Structure formats: C-alpha cells, structure tokens
Amino acid sequence: MKQLFIILIIGAVFHLCHGNSLAENWGAWQDSWGRGNQPEKKKDAGHYLPPSAAQGKKIEPKSTREECFCSFAEEGALRELLDELKNLEQTKAKQAGRQSVVRQKYRIARKLRKYDDCRAEDALKKLIQENSCEGLGDGEFFCVAWGASLSLQEIKSKKDLKKLIPATPLAAQLKIFKKYGPHPHENEFASHAVMEFLISQAATNSRVYIPLLVEYFTTCHEIVPVILNYPAETIIGLKRCLYASDPTVVWAGIYLTRTLGEISLFEDVYDIAFANKSPLDYSQQEDMEAIRTISIAFFKTDEKNAIPYYRNILYGNFSKSQEYIVSGIKDLTNPDLLNLLKEFAIHLQYEPDSHPSLLEERLKKKISRMEASQP
C-alpha cells in the first residue's frame, strides 16, 4: 500500500512537469495519424501552403459570391441575364441604332425580379446605386435605379406575399399586415399588395380588415368607396390614426375624417390638436401648426356644430388658428357665429396686448360682412 502511494505521488509530479509537452506531442501524433502519408505542408512568409503551391503549381482561386448562385432552379437563365448586364457595364457610349444602355439596363432590372436568388439581389443593389437616367420628352424621364428598386422590393417580399391568401390563418396574415402596412411604406410593392388583399377580403371579416385598411392606407383614395360601406369599423381605424404618435399619420387621419364627413369625431380632433390629449410631441411647433390647420378645415365642414370648438380656440392661446377661424368662416348667415365673433371682439378690447392687431382688423371686417348677410 505504501509503495502504491509513492507511485501516485511520483506520477502527479511527472504530470505537472511534463503534462503540457505530452499534450503537444499527443496532438502532433494525432495530426500525423490523420494525415497518414500526406506530404508535409511548407511555410511561406508565415503562411502554410498546400503541396501543389510548394511545388510551383498554379492554384485556381476559390469561387466568390459573384460566381455562386443561391438557387439552381433557373441558374442558366439568370446567368445569361447577368452576363448581358456585365457586358453592358463595359459599354461606355450609347448604342447607335439600338436601345440605349439605360433602357437595356432598366429592362434587365425589371427581368431580375423573377429570380429569388442572392446574385439577382446583388445585381439590383448595384443598379440602385447608379445615377443613370434618360429623358422621355416633355420633361419626363426614367431611371435605372427606379426599376431596380421595384424589382428588389418584389424579390424581398415574394415569400411573404405568397402566404397572403384567404386560406392563411388570420394570425399569420396579421404578421404580414404589420410588416408592410405601417407608415412609412418602405416596400411599396408589398404595401400595395397588402392593400389590395384587404380591399378584396373586406366583406369576409370587416371588423378586422376595415380598421387595418384605414389605419395603414389612410392617404390612398382607393379605400374610400370600400370603407364607406362600413361606418362603425371605419371609425375604429380613424381613431387609431388620430391617436398615433406620428404627426404625419395624425394629419392624414384628420384629412380622411374630413373627407368622410365624420363630424362625430369633432371632439376627438379638438382634443388632439388643441387640448394636448394624444401621444404627439407638442413641442414640435411646425407639426402642430399643420395639424391645427387641417383640424380647423375639418370644423369648417359643419360650422353650426363646430361653434363650441371655435369658442375654445378663440379664447385660447392659438393666435394663428384664431386668425384662420375668423377669416375663414363660411356660414355668414349664422346668427350664433355672429354673436360669438361680437363677444370675442369685446374680449379683445379688454386685452388689447394679448392679440395681434391684424386679428382685430380681420374680426371687424368679418363682423361687418356677417351683419350685412343676416336675413
């Protein structure tokens, strides 16, 4: 037992002193075992070279991304198209008696949309960077980058759009809607496809599709004839726009609300534009002025019901909006509007320094016109 203990101590000391070298020798032995009888690699300038290089043989370069295709279904047709494009890139001048280089590149860019392949995407990205355009006459022109951008959008969204069919579960559809629907529409091709799908399926599930149609495609005139058939669902979509944090979406929402004549949303619009009751950044003066201007334009569509909101704006701290209301009143025969303006004129007399003189001048002229228009 004592002898066994001594042997173990000696073994431990030997391992501590020689363990690393043994490991290195073991690794080298494994390498030589794996190589078998292969010739030894030689060094050159700090790098190992394969035997063929060491013997002076020519080494063929490995394939690069430009030579590899990500799909092989239509590799032949795509290669021909890419070769044609490569030859065009080497052509400096326009071809006499033939299509111009710009037109040929545009044609190739549009053809590339058929190929869901990394080589096609790379070629389109390169064409998008080109500043090649050609005039069509009468001040119109087209550019290679436009065709390339459209084709690239189509390729990138092709897989998603194949799923955009009625048989696809609603949860999967919603993912596609949320990917391509919200503003700004970075992929116009896919966004348009989503809009067309929502329009075509509106009647099958109006509670889901109509609010999305209004929310995502607020500025598209194509949706108006459709959403007019679903007033309750349209209101849901309009409110989503009105209470958005993006001022451009809010502005578009108010504009569509005005187009549809949804005066039931007067109070919501007032709260958003003048009562600071939304996620908007109210410190952005330019954005807020645009929203307040379109809001007043909305109020003007039904001034009889807008009087309470006119009153709040006139007695508030909105000088530009006050001028717009006073100068823009359309219903000159409305006695309630006339009384509101007369009351406001008296208010200005007690606070002459709180409003610009231009407002007082416009107010006097408007009151005179309205008094003359009374029945």
Image: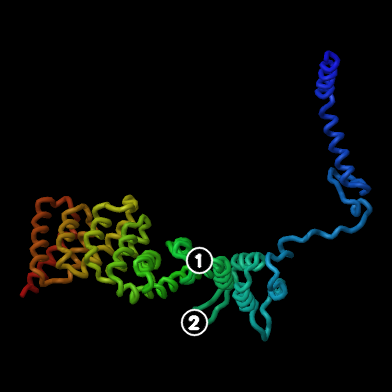
**Image: 336 above or below 32:** below
Badge 1 amino acid:
Asn
**Separation (CA) of disc 1 from disc 2:** 29 Å
362 displayed left or right of 63: left
Residue under circle 2? 138
**Image: 246 above or below 115:** above
* Residue 205 point in image, percent of width and height: 37, 69
* Residue 229 point in image, percent of width and height: 30, 75
Residue 188: tell me if it is visible.
no
175 displayed left or right of 108: left
Residue visible at 24% across and 56% down in the picture: 271
For this orientation, the residue located farthest to the bottom is 97
Q: Earlier in the sequence, mark 1 or mark 2?
A: 2
Residue visible at 48% across and 68% down in the picture: 168
Label 1 CA crowd tier, 10 Å (few <14, some 14–19, many 20+): some
Q: Nearer the viewer, residue 105 or 224?
A: 224
* Residue 358 point in image, percent of width and height: 19, 60
For this orientation, the residue located farthest to the top is 2
Badge 1 element: loop
Residue 116 lies in what quarter of the image?
bottom right
Badge 2 element: loop
Pick the quarter of the image with the C terminus.
bottom left
Residue 238 lies in what quarter of the image?
bottom left
Residue under circle 1? 187
Residue visible at 50% across and 66% down in the picture: 187
